[in-house]
Every structure is written in structure tokens, then in C-alpha cells.
Amino acid sequence: MKKYISILVLSIAVISCKSKAVAVQGNTSQTIVEKEDKKVIEKHYNNKLDFSTLYIKASAKYADEKQSQNVTAEIRIEKDKQILISVRFLGITMAKALITPDAVSYYEKINSTYYEGDFTSLSKWLGTDLDYSKVQNLLVGEAFDDLRKGKYTQTIVENLFRLDEEKDANLKKTFFLDGEKYLIQKEEISQPSENRTLQIAYSDTKTFDQGILPTSIEINAVQPKGKTSINLNYNNISFNEELSFPYSVPSGYKKVTIK
């Protein structure tokens, strides 16, 4: 079940960095750029996708230290309202997740289980704040956090703007943006004292009338129990079509509780 839920919810299953970490010191060889972060952040949000609905058909590969699995994923987004993700293997739906600002629901076929809850329960379970916007941002290539609400130290590393959050010394968050279009190239969340790291990297963008969308997402998570990676490649993309969001738990499935 775990591998399908990891692919389904993406950020939910792998973002497990807790707020008890000691931040890693920055590289002293970096070029310091003072009082420029607001300009970079402003330009990042000038690239915000303008759409009402988004349909994505993707290929996905999940791998950990014991196994790997290739599946297809269908992602439907009604902006700021709901996300439906379906995971299929050999054409058979193995799992579905419906995510709204108020609730997260999923079911998976292998163990015939389902979950219904809100982001409060998931955030407590994962040890980090999680909400609908963060999941949507991850899928469309925007910064995981709202950069306009944070305070950052800015450096330039390999021609990328690097923003290190200063808010919490116990949790390190770093965002890398390109210097041309100010798109997110990579973002990292780490908890070194607990050996927990999450890295999200974007590549192979496409330009649409609605804006720029990355078509390749690589997620790598390191936890004490091992490493997990998810590679997501967008194969078919369409905007502003009328979409349905069918979701219902099959009869006979057992409800699971997150504690």
C-alpha cells in the first residue's frame, strides 16, 4: 500500500521532516546577494499559471531500497478547489486520492483500505505543516511554501538564486530559482539531526498560453528507514477543459486511521 500512496499524494507520503532539526551551515564560498530576495520572489510569482482546470497524464516510477514500480498517473486539478489523482498499473486502477482544501481521502486496492481525514491529522503524523496549496504547488512547479511570507538569505550558486529560509533554525528549507525566468529548479527540506531530507527537482518545461509548466518532477526522500524516489513525467497536458472528479470508495474496504 505504501508505494501507491507515495505516488498518489506525492508530498504527503515523503515529506516527513520534523521541526526538531539543527540547520546545516551554508557554503561559505557562495556569493552573497543582500536585500534582493523580494525582487526574485516577485518575479517567480509573475510566472504563476493562469488556469481553471488542468489535466495531466503521467508516467511514474517509484523506487525504494527493496523494490521499484512503474505505473501511470492521471492528475486532475480544479485550481484551488480539488485534486484527483488516479494510479493505474496495466490499465487497472490501483489507488485514488481526492484532495480538497478541507479534506484528504484515498483508497488503495491491494489491501482494500481507505482513509478519510483532514490536513491537521496528516500534519501531525508527518511532523510538518501540510495544506492543499502545497500539494498543488508541487504539481505545477511553484515553490512548495509561499515565499512571499518568509524571510530568506539569498546567495548565487551555479547561476541559480538560492534562498535559505531564516524563520526556523530547527528546520532547513532551501529554494533554487533560475536567473532567467525565475522558475523553481529545486527545493530542499532537511532535518540533519534526524537524517531526514526531501529534495524536489524540476526539469523539461513546456510553455503554454496559460504559462510555463514543468514536465518532469523528481522527488527524493531520505529517512532513517531508507531512501525513496519518485519520478514523474507529464506526457499529456491540457488546460481549461470541463473535468469530472469521480471518487467513491468501493464497498467492503476497511477504513484506516492515522495516529
Image: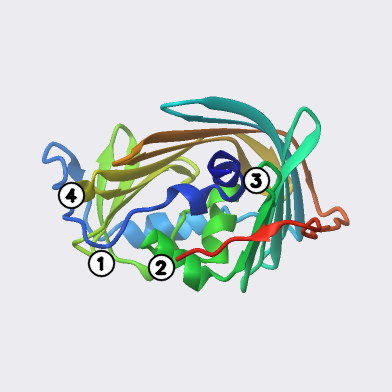
Pick whichever, 131 or 94, lies toward us: 94
- Tell whether label 4 touches label 2 (CB within 8 Å): no
Residue 178, visible in the rendered structure: no
Distance from disc 2 to disc 1, alpha carbons, whole Å, reads 20 Å
Numbered tag placed on residue 240 in the rendering = none
Q: Is residue 48 left or right of residue 33?
A: right
Q: Which mark sits nearer the N-terminus, 2 or 1?
A: 2
Say which element carries label 4.
helix
In the rendered image of this protein, does residue 12 appear above or below residue 148?
Answer: above
| Residue position for label 2 | 124
| Residue position for label 1 | 167
| Place of residue 7 in the rendered image (x, y in percent of width and height, measured from the top left) | 58, 42
Pick whichever, 12 or 162, lies toward us: 12
In the rendered image of this protein, does residue 75 appear above or below residue 38?
Answer: above
Pick whichever, 113 or 130, lies toward us: 113
Q: Amino acid at mark 3?
A: Asn
Image point (16%, 45%), residue name: 26
Q: Amino acid at mark 2?
A: Lys
Numbered tag placed on residue 111 in the rendering = 3
